[in-house]
Image: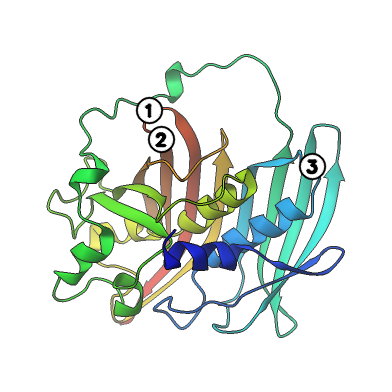
Amino acid sequence: MSQALTDLISLLTLERSDEHRFIGEGSTGDGAPATYGGHFLGQAISAALHDSDATFMLHSMHGYFLRGGIPNQPILYTVQTIREGRSFCTKRVTASQKNKTTFELLASLNKKESGENFESIATKDLSNITLPKNIEPYRDIMTKLDPLPLPEEWALREHGIDVRIVNAPWASSGLSQQGGINMWIKTNGIAPIEPKLHAAMLAYQSDESIADNVLLPFNLTWGSPGLFFVSLDHALWLHNPINLNEWHFVEQKPVTIQNNRGLAAAKVWSTSGLLVASFNQEVLMRESP
Protein backbone atom coordinates (compact mmCIF):
# COMPACT_ATOMS: atom_id res chain seq x y z
CA MET A 1 0.00 0.00 0.00
CA SER A 2 1.37 3.43 -0.93
CA GLN A 3 1.76 6.17 1.67
CA ALA A 4 -0.76 8.25 -0.27
CA LEU A 5 -3.38 5.49 0.00
CA THR A 6 -2.60 5.04 3.71
CA ASP A 7 -3.15 8.79 4.16
CA LEU A 8 -6.45 8.65 2.24
CA ILE A 9 -7.76 5.78 4.37
CA SER A 10 -6.74 7.71 7.49
CA LEU A 11 -8.57 10.77 6.17
CA LEU A 12 -11.76 8.73 5.71
CA THR A 13 -11.47 6.99 9.11
CA LEU A 14 -13.25 9.34 11.49
CA GLU A 15 -12.92 9.62 15.25
CA ARG A 16 -16.22 9.05 17.09
CA SER A 17 -16.63 11.87 19.61
CA ASP A 18 -20.21 11.13 20.69
CA GLU A 19 -23.03 8.75 19.86
CA HIS A 20 -23.85 10.53 16.59
CA ARG A 21 -20.83 12.78 16.17
CA PHE A 22 -17.54 12.21 14.40
CA ILE A 23 -14.39 14.27 13.92
CA GLY A 24 -12.50 14.23 10.62
CA GLU A 25 -9.06 15.53 9.72
CA GLY A 26 -8.93 18.93 8.04
CA SER A 27 -7.71 19.32 4.48
CA THR A 28 -4.10 19.82 3.38
CA GLY A 29 -2.41 20.02 -0.01
CA ASP A 30 -5.58 20.81 -1.97
CA GLY A 31 -3.96 23.64 -3.92
CA ALA A 32 -6.80 26.00 -2.99
CA PRO A 33 -7.58 28.31 -0.05
CA ALA A 34 -10.69 26.25 0.80
CA THR A 35 -11.29 22.51 1.21
CA TYR A 36 -11.49 20.05 -1.69
CA GLY A 37 -15.16 19.09 -2.08
CA GLY A 38 -14.38 15.38 -2.17
CA HIS A 39 -12.92 15.73 1.32
CA PHE A 40 -16.40 16.64 2.64
CA LEU A 41 -18.13 14.02 0.48
CA GLY A 42 -15.90 11.14 1.55
CA GLN A 43 -15.88 11.98 5.25
CA ALA A 44 -19.64 12.68 5.40
CA ILE A 45 -20.41 9.36 3.72
CA SER A 46 -18.08 7.62 6.16
CA ALA A 47 -19.93 9.28 9.07
CA ALA A 48 -23.35 8.25 7.70
CA LEU A 49 -22.29 4.65 7.12
CA HIS A 50 -20.62 4.21 10.50
CA ASP A 51 -23.62 5.70 12.28
CA SER A 52 -25.80 2.95 10.77
CA ASP A 53 -26.50 -0.74 11.17
CA ALA A 54 -23.66 -2.73 9.57
CA THR A 55 -26.02 -4.25 7.00
CA PHE A 56 -26.98 -0.86 5.53
CA MET A 57 -24.93 0.27 2.52
CA LEU A 58 -24.90 3.49 0.52
CA HIS A 59 -27.04 3.70 -2.60
CA SER A 60 -27.42 7.47 -3.07
CA MET A 61 -26.34 10.80 -1.63
CA HIS A 62 -26.99 14.48 -2.27
CA GLY A 63 -24.62 17.04 -0.81
CA TYR A 64 -24.59 20.86 -0.64
CA PHE A 65 -21.42 22.92 -0.29
CA LEU A 66 -22.41 25.85 1.92
CA ARG A 67 -19.08 27.45 2.87
CA GLY A 68 -15.47 26.96 1.90
CA GLY A 69 -13.83 24.67 4.43
CA ILE A 70 -10.91 25.88 6.57
CA PRO A 71 -7.72 23.93 5.75
CA ASN A 72 -5.81 22.29 8.60
CA GLN A 73 -8.82 22.59 10.91
CA PRO A 74 -10.75 19.49 12.13
CA ILE A 75 -14.29 19.02 10.88
CA LEU A 76 -17.18 17.99 13.12
CA TYR A 77 -19.79 15.72 11.49
CA THR A 78 -23.18 15.39 13.19
CA VAL A 79 -25.45 12.58 11.96
CA GLN A 80 -29.24 12.58 12.29
CA THR A 81 -31.43 9.61 11.39
CA ILE A 82 -34.38 10.91 9.37
CA ARG A 83 -35.98 7.51 8.91
CA GLU A 84 -34.92 3.92 9.44
CA GLY A 85 -37.08 1.13 8.06
CA ARG A 86 -36.52 -2.55 7.47
CA SER A 87 -34.68 -2.11 4.18
CA PHE A 88 -33.97 1.64 3.79
CA CYS A 89 -32.42 4.25 6.05
CA THR A 90 -32.01 8.01 5.48
CA LYS A 91 -29.32 10.02 7.26
CA ARG A 92 -28.61 13.75 7.37
CA VAL A 93 -24.98 14.69 7.94
CA THR A 94 -23.96 18.24 8.88
CA ALA A 95 -20.31 19.27 8.72
CA SER A 96 -19.15 22.27 10.73
CA GLN A 97 -16.00 24.18 11.61
CA LYS A 98 -15.80 26.86 14.28
CA ASN A 99 -19.56 26.50 14.92
CA LYS A 100 -20.44 27.30 11.29
CA THR A 101 -22.06 24.79 8.93
CA THR A 102 -19.85 24.19 5.90
CA PHE A 103 -21.53 21.22 4.21
CA GLU A 104 -24.74 19.19 4.42
CA LEU A 105 -25.52 15.79 2.99
CA LEU A 106 -28.53 13.50 2.76
CA ALA A 107 -27.61 9.85 2.32
CA SER A 108 -29.96 7.00 1.52
CA LEU A 109 -28.83 3.55 2.59
CA ASN A 110 -30.38 0.16 1.99
CA LYS A 111 -29.80 -3.51 2.65
CA LYS A 112 -28.84 -5.92 -0.09
CA GLU A 113 -31.88 -7.32 -1.83
CA SER A 114 -32.46 -10.17 -4.26
CA GLY A 115 -34.57 -9.56 -7.32
CA GLU A 116 -34.58 -9.06 -11.06
CA ASN A 117 -31.71 -7.24 -12.80
CA PHE A 118 -31.89 -5.62 -16.21
CA GLU A 119 -28.35 -4.80 -17.27
CA SER A 120 -28.55 -4.51 -21.06
CA ILE A 121 -29.12 -0.73 -20.87
CA ALA A 122 -26.39 -0.33 -18.25
CA THR A 123 -23.46 -1.96 -20.05
CA LYS A 124 -20.72 -0.42 -22.17
CA ASP A 125 -18.21 -1.79 -24.66
CA LEU A 126 -14.79 -0.72 -23.36
CA SER A 127 -12.76 -2.72 -25.88
CA ASN A 128 -11.71 0.41 -27.79
CA ILE A 129 -10.59 2.31 -24.67
CA THR A 130 -6.83 2.48 -24.04
CA LEU A 131 -5.95 0.22 -21.12
CA PRO A 132 -4.64 1.87 -17.95
CA LYS A 133 -1.38 -0.09 -18.11
CA ASN A 134 -0.64 1.73 -21.37
CA ILE A 135 -1.23 5.20 -19.89
CA GLU A 136 1.21 7.23 -17.79
CA PRO A 137 0.19 7.98 -14.20
CA TYR A 138 -1.46 11.36 -13.62
CA ARG A 139 1.53 12.93 -11.87
CA ASP A 140 3.93 11.85 -14.65
CA ILE A 141 1.75 13.60 -17.23
CA MET A 142 1.52 16.75 -15.13
CA THR A 143 5.30 17.01 -14.59
CA LYS A 144 5.76 17.35 -18.37
CA LEU A 145 3.33 20.26 -18.73
CA ASP A 146 4.47 23.88 -18.76
CA PRO A 147 2.54 25.78 -17.64
CA LEU A 148 0.67 23.47 -15.29
CA PRO A 149 -3.11 23.59 -15.88
CA LEU A 150 -3.79 23.12 -12.16
CA PRO A 151 -2.10 24.30 -8.94
CA GLU A 152 1.22 22.56 -8.37
CA GLU A 153 0.31 21.50 -4.83
CA TRP A 154 -2.52 19.37 -6.27
CA ALA A 155 -1.15 18.38 -9.68
CA LEU A 156 2.27 17.11 -8.62
CA ARG A 157 1.52 15.32 -5.37
CA GLU A 158 0.96 11.57 -5.10
CA HIS A 159 -2.71 10.73 -4.61
CA GLY A 160 -4.38 7.80 -2.86
CA ILE A 161 -6.32 7.04 -6.04
CA ASP A 162 -4.27 6.14 -9.12
CA VAL A 163 -5.66 8.12 -12.08
CA ARG A 164 -4.85 7.28 -15.71
CA ILE A 165 -6.18 9.99 -18.05
CA VAL A 166 -7.77 8.78 -21.29
CA ASN A 167 -9.30 12.09 -22.44
CA ALA A 168 -8.50 15.62 -21.23
CA PRO A 169 -7.09 18.87 -22.60
CA TRP A 170 -3.72 17.80 -21.14
CA ALA A 171 -3.84 14.30 -22.69
CA SER A 172 -2.47 13.50 -26.14
CA SER A 173 -5.92 12.23 -27.22
CA GLY A 174 -7.66 15.47 -26.23
CA LEU A 175 -11.27 15.61 -25.08
CA SER A 176 -13.73 12.75 -25.50
CA GLN A 177 -16.34 12.78 -28.27
CA GLN A 178 -18.78 14.09 -25.66
CA GLY A 179 -16.42 16.94 -24.84
CA GLY A 180 -15.42 15.59 -21.44
CA ILE A 181 -12.61 14.21 -19.28
CA ASN A 182 -12.41 10.40 -19.12
CA MET A 183 -10.11 8.28 -16.98
CA TRP A 184 -9.35 4.99 -15.32
CA ILE A 185 -9.20 4.94 -11.50
CA LYS A 186 -8.13 2.46 -8.82
CA THR A 187 -6.51 2.56 -5.41
CA ASN A 188 -2.80 3.45 -5.33
CA GLY A 189 -2.05 0.07 -3.77
CA ILE A 190 -4.39 -2.46 -2.17
CA ALA A 191 -6.94 -1.19 0.35
CA PRO A 192 -8.79 -3.40 2.86
CA ILE A 193 -11.88 -5.00 1.33
CA GLU A 194 -14.42 -3.00 3.32
CA PRO A 195 -17.46 -1.89 1.26
CA LYS A 196 -18.05 1.20 3.42
CA LEU A 197 -14.47 2.35 2.91
CA HIS A 198 -14.65 1.85 -0.86
CA ALA A 199 -17.95 3.77 -1.04
CA ALA A 200 -16.32 6.65 0.86
CA MET A 201 -13.27 6.53 -1.44
CA LEU A 202 -15.50 6.74 -4.50
CA ALA A 203 -17.34 9.73 -3.01
CA TYR A 204 -13.97 11.37 -2.31
CA GLN A 205 -12.70 10.72 -5.85
CA SER A 206 -15.94 11.73 -7.59
CA ASP A 207 -15.14 15.42 -7.06
CA GLU A 208 -11.63 15.20 -8.55
CA SER A 209 -12.35 16.58 -12.04
CA ILE A 210 -16.14 16.53 -12.57
CA ALA A 211 -16.36 20.33 -12.21
CA ASP A 212 -13.61 20.91 -14.79
CA ASN A 213 -15.91 19.56 -17.48
CA VAL A 214 -18.06 22.72 -17.48
CA LEU A 215 -14.94 24.88 -17.94
CA LEU A 216 -13.61 22.99 -20.95
CA PRO A 217 -15.68 24.94 -23.56
CA PHE A 218 -13.97 28.12 -22.30
CA ASN A 219 -10.41 26.69 -22.17
CA LEU A 220 -10.33 27.17 -18.40
CA THR A 221 -9.62 25.00 -15.35
CA TRP A 222 -10.44 25.55 -11.67
CA GLY A 223 -6.88 26.81 -11.31
CA SER A 224 -7.23 29.54 -13.95
CA PRO A 225 -6.43 33.08 -12.67
CA GLY A 226 -9.30 35.52 -12.34
CA LEU A 227 -11.90 32.76 -12.04
CA PHE A 228 -14.32 32.43 -9.11
CA PHE A 229 -15.31 28.79 -9.19
CA VAL A 230 -17.06 26.80 -6.44
CA SER A 231 -19.11 23.63 -6.22
CA LEU A 232 -22.77 24.11 -5.29
CA ASP A 233 -24.11 20.57 -4.97
CA HIS A 234 -23.18 16.99 -5.76
CA ALA A 235 -25.24 13.83 -6.21
CA LEU A 236 -24.02 10.23 -6.41
CA TRP A 237 -25.82 6.92 -6.96
CA LEU A 238 -24.08 3.63 -6.22
CA HIS A 239 -25.82 0.96 -8.30
CA ASN A 240 -23.59 -1.87 -7.13
CA PRO A 241 -20.96 -2.20 -4.39
CA ILE A 242 -17.60 -1.03 -5.75
CA ASN A 243 -14.14 -2.51 -5.24
CA LEU A 244 -11.66 0.25 -6.05
CA ASN A 245 -8.75 -2.18 -5.82
CA GLU A 246 -9.83 -2.95 -9.40
CA TRP A 247 -9.74 -0.53 -12.34
CA HIS A 248 -12.91 1.40 -13.17
CA PHE A 249 -13.55 3.67 -16.15
CA VAL A 250 -14.98 7.12 -15.36
CA GLU A 251 -16.80 8.81 -18.25
CA GLN A 252 -17.60 12.52 -17.75
CA LYS A 253 -19.21 15.27 -19.82
CA PRO A 254 -20.56 18.82 -19.53
CA VAL A 255 -24.37 18.95 -19.63
CA THR A 256 -25.26 22.65 -19.60
CA ILE A 257 -23.85 26.05 -18.63
CA GLN A 258 -26.44 28.78 -17.97
CA ASN A 259 -26.80 31.74 -15.57
CA ASN A 260 -23.20 31.25 -14.38
CA ARG A 261 -24.08 27.72 -13.26
CA GLY A 262 -22.70 24.63 -14.94
CA LEU A 263 -23.84 21.01 -14.65
CA ALA A 264 -21.63 18.00 -15.41
CA ALA A 265 -22.46 14.29 -15.37
CA ALA A 266 -20.40 11.13 -14.95
CA LYS A 267 -20.74 7.37 -15.10
CA VAL A 268 -18.47 4.74 -13.56
CA TRP A 269 -18.02 1.41 -15.37
CA SER A 270 -16.34 -1.81 -14.27
CA THR A 271 -13.82 -3.45 -16.60
CA SER A 272 -16.58 -5.84 -17.68
CA GLY A 273 -18.64 -2.84 -18.85
CA LEU A 274 -21.22 -2.85 -16.04
CA LEU A 275 -22.51 0.50 -14.81
CA VAL A 276 -21.47 0.66 -11.14
CA ALA A 277 -22.16 4.30 -10.21
CA SER A 278 -23.37 7.66 -11.53
CA PHE A 279 -22.74 11.16 -10.25
CA ASN A 280 -23.58 14.78 -11.16
CA GLN A 281 -22.30 18.12 -9.92
CA GLU A 282 -23.43 21.73 -10.29
CA VAL A 283 -20.94 24.58 -9.97
CA LEU A 284 -20.93 28.36 -9.87
CA MET A 285 -18.49 30.07 -12.24
CA ARG A 286 -17.74 33.79 -12.53
CA GLU A 287 -14.88 35.44 -14.40
CA SER A 288 -13.39 38.72 -13.22
CA PRO A 289 -14.18 41.66 -15.55
Residue at (68, 66) in percent of width and height: 14
* First along the sequence among labels 1 and 3: 3
Q: Which residue is under mark 1?
A: 273
Closest to the observer: 256 or 268?
268
* First along the sequence among labels 2 and 3: 3
Q: What is the C-alpha distance between the residues marked 1 and 3? A: 29 Å
- Density class for disc 2 (Cα within 10 Å; few <14, some 14-19, many ≥20) is many
Task: Estimate the x, y position of residue 278 in percent, counting from the top left.
Answer: 49, 40
| Colour setting | rainbow
Q: Is residue 89 above or below residue 46?
A: above
Task: Estimate the x, y position of residue 153 in percent, counting from the top left.
Answer: 34, 79
Closest to the observer: 237 or 285?
237
Task: Estimate the x, y position of residue 96 in percent, counting from the top left.
Answer: 70, 75
Q: Are marks 2 and 3 in contact (CB under 8 Å)?
A: no
Q: Quadrant of the C terminus?
A: bottom left
Could you tell me which secondary element the residue under label 3 belongs to? Answer: strand
Q: Quadrant of residue 246?
A: top left
Q: What is the C-alpha distance between the residues marked 2 and 1? A: 6 Å
Determine if residue 46 is in view: yes
Please name the amino acid that badge 3 sits on: Cys
Q: Are marks 2 and 1 in contact (CB under 8 Å)?
A: yes
Residue at (79, 42) in percent of width and height: 89
Q: Which residue is under mark 3?
A: 89
Determine if residue 38 is in view: no
Residue at (27, 60) in percent of width and height: 138
Could you tell me which secondary element the residue under label 2 belongs to? Answer: strand
Task: Estimate the x, y position of residue 273 in percent, counting from the top left.
Answer: 38, 27
